[in-house]
Image: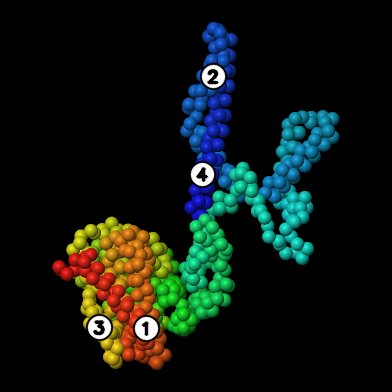
Amino acid sequence: MNRTASRSNQQSTRHTQAFGSALARGGLSLLGGLVSHLAASAMIDGNILSGPNNLPYLTIAGVLLAYLLSGAPAHRFGQLWARAMAKVVQVPPDAVLAAFAGATLGLLLTVLLNNVLAEVPGFTWYWSQLIAVVLVLGAGGFFVANRRLIPFLHPADPTVMSNGASAPRDKVIDTSAIIDGRPLDDLPVGDLATYNLITLPPNALMGDALAKMLRHRIHRIVVAEGDTVHGVVESLDVFSFLSNHSHLILTRIDQADSLEALEGAAGQTTRMVQQLYRSGTNVGLIGDLVQEVNARLFERTWEMIAPPELVKNSCLIVMGSEGRGEQLLKTDQDNGLILRDDYTPPANLQDICDRFSAELERFGYPECAGKIMLNNPDWRGTVSEWSERTRTWMIQGSPENLMNLAIFLDAHAVTGDERLLDRVRDRLWELATDNEATLSRFASAIDAFGSGSNWLSRVFALGDSGELLHMKKLGIFPIVHGIRSLALANRIKATGTVERIHALVQMGKLKQSWGDNLINSLHIFMGMRLKVGLQELEAGKPVSGHVDVSEISSLERDLLKDSLGIVKRFKATLHQRFRLDVM
């Protein structure tokens, strides 16, 4: 629908401009004919020209010559005409009617005054025209300014019922529709739309609607399928359905006036996740909601700590599971800072970054063991410094550099100028290599925690007890990094694992069945990890990420077996694609 409306608007603008150009070219051609006719008449009268029919011939020649020479000025006039018509479209219809009514009254009053003053000595055409201009402009301006008080400009509305409520309207008339010229019965409103609708398909979940509302900070979403609009979902509908208090957390974050108030809001996120999980919400959707809440929390924290000029000339980014939108419980910080090239940061930038990291730790986000935080100078810098840094990571190709590159590929802008991150990414993709050796070294990290085949056989041994499986190492990381490697090889710029899978399927690089299996397996691993993590938090223990096979149900055990089997086959496919066995 948005593309259709945009094309229609562009076509309408072109038609308006073409009409203005044709109008100007015709007028200039007639003017050229008139000038040529007068010149020819003068030359004939002065005996400079003689012979029959010279006057019409020269007049026609003047018209044609003016037409040939008027292309550029006519085109310019057409542009001005289109802009003027665009302004006219914005004038309310009742204002136009009021101006016409005022002008009519002014002319009638002028006629009456002309009759009264006709006998006055010295009353000439000059004074008559001056009076006409004053009365027409004065009456027109008065009517426009007071058009709301003039009854005949606002007749009784048949759509207003006796109790004052508005009945549904069959048609809405706008000046843009009138100027378009087409019958209102045949004119789709989409052809006059000048904005992009934020839509969801009818089969989307209510949680998807909430996540999109939070992301775009809106209160209504159009439910549409292609060009067919099914209705509108409002925030009140979504909040009433979900009842998970996430909107209350965001409200507290937006209204917070101190870091202490933000700390109180941050303390509610785990409870929100717990409620969502117990209500059966999809873990992928929980990740989206957590990402939006955390992003708003980090944004407000940074704005309270950093000077406004620093916020304006920088881009705060998050990476890792938070950047991919796959973080469910609070984990260690993975963030960085990109500065504008021509900006000189404050002298106490290090202190500002240290305070930001310390505040996040106070909110429950521990420091990263690998120091992947903006208070580490290696993870902040200008656009040029970041571009050179990522170039080094890609070209040198050491295990540490490639892992840093993998972390950065998941970067997501939180606040500030997002274009700074886009510039670094664009330069990185310009360097994206087709070198299979580099891609193979990058993808080889899928085996960083072993092949997983021994764990798969142990899961089948139902009599084992106390067997601990690390969900991230055995399931989540191989899928995430394997898909990230395929995304790098195919230059896919999406950051979320699910979005990358969809892009690979769309490009034909991954079968639809494979994509569905990988998404389901990823969510099974994330769900089991979340379940155990919530149990550990309730028991006052730190989140370990381990699942005790003996404590899961038979259904969960079967799902885990199938998911580990999918991971095993996926890793075998990656070994073949990147030739990891010959490294």
The amino acid pointed to by label 3 is Ser
Q: Residue at x 39, y 82 (%)?
A: 530
Q: Callout 4 environment at 10 Å: few (<14), some (14 to 19), or many (20+)?
A: few
Q: Are marks 2 and 3 in contact (CB under 8 Å)?
A: no
Residue 422 picture quarter: bottom left
N-terminal label among 3 and 1:
3
Q: Are marks 3 and 4 in contact (CB under 8 Å)?
A: no
N-terminal label among 1 and 2:
2
Q: Which residue is mark 2?
A: 60
Q: Which residue is mark 3?
A: 457
The amino acid pointed to by label 1 is Glu
Q: Residue at x 19, y 66 (%)?
A: 579
Label for residue 11?
A: 4
Q: Secondary structure at mark 3?
A: helix
State the separation of the CA atoms marked 1 and 2: 91 Å
Q: Which residue is mark 1?
A: 556
Q: Are marks 4 and 2 in contact (CB under 8 Å)?
A: no
N-terminal label among 3 and 4:
4
Q: Where residue 503 sits in the image (x, y, percent)?
A: 36, 62
State the separation of the CA atoms marked 1 and 4: 57 Å
Look at the picture and state if 169 lies above or below 27: below
The amino acid pointed to by label 4 is Gln
Q: Nearer the viewer, mark 3 or mark 4?
A: 3
Q: Where residue 39 sits in the image (x, y, percent)?
A: 55, 17
Residue 65 visible in this rendered orientation of the protein = yes
Task: Please tell me which residue lies in front, 477 or 216.
Answer: 477
Residue 387 visible in this rendered orientation of the protein = no
Look at the picture and state if 91 lies above or below 418: above
